[in-house]
Amino acid sequence: MAPRRAGPVAASPENAGGDNRNERKRIVFNLGLDEYKVLEDMTRESGAESVTMMIREALRLVRVLQEQSKEGYSEVIVQMPNTLKRRLLVIDFLAPITDAGMAEPEK
């Protein structure tokens, strides 16, 4: 089976926030200088137009991961196309979640 591709994650009815797309909420982040430098580096390296766009794309990516987790997927595997070398990414918050959004209890 071909791998399911998630990106680039574009605005769509499923991940755009419903009919409220034109409504805006202002949020403020207080980041340390080191954290902000990381955010600036990520923005530049990704080619995002702005820090705001980088944060939006990160939120969309997290949403895709959450949706997959709801379906029972709990591992992210990345692969180099030219060598087919694979790596398993461990993402702590990607534990199986229920529809209520709570992590299922360990057995």
Image: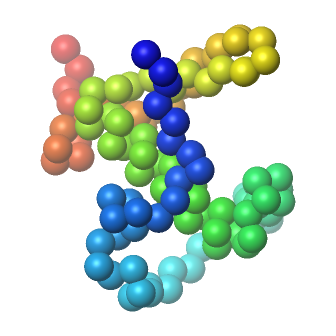
On the image, the x and y values in percent for residue 25 come to 44, 85
Residue at 22% across / 42% down in the picture?
102
Residue at x-position 20% and y-position 26%? 105
Looking at the image, residue 99 sits to the left or right of residue 54; the answer is left
Task: Give the quadrant of the N terminus.
Answer: top left
Location of residue 66 with respect to 79 vertically, above or below = below
Task: Please provide percent x and percent y for residue 22.
Answer: 41, 87
Instruction: Tell me which corner region of the image, top left, top right, bottom left or bottom right, holds residue 52.
Output: bottom right
Left or right for 64, reference 70:
right
* Image-based side of 45 in relation to 77, left or right: right
Residue 89 percent across, percent down from the top left: 57, 24
Query: Against 97, is 35 above or below?
Result: below
Query: Visible in this render: residue 27?
Result: yes
Q: Quadrant of residue 24?
A: bottom left
Q: Position of residue 10 (x, y in %)?
A: 52, 59
Residue at point 71%, 11% (across, down): 85
Whether 24 is drawn above or below 84: the answer is below
Q: Quadrant of residue 29?
A: bottom right
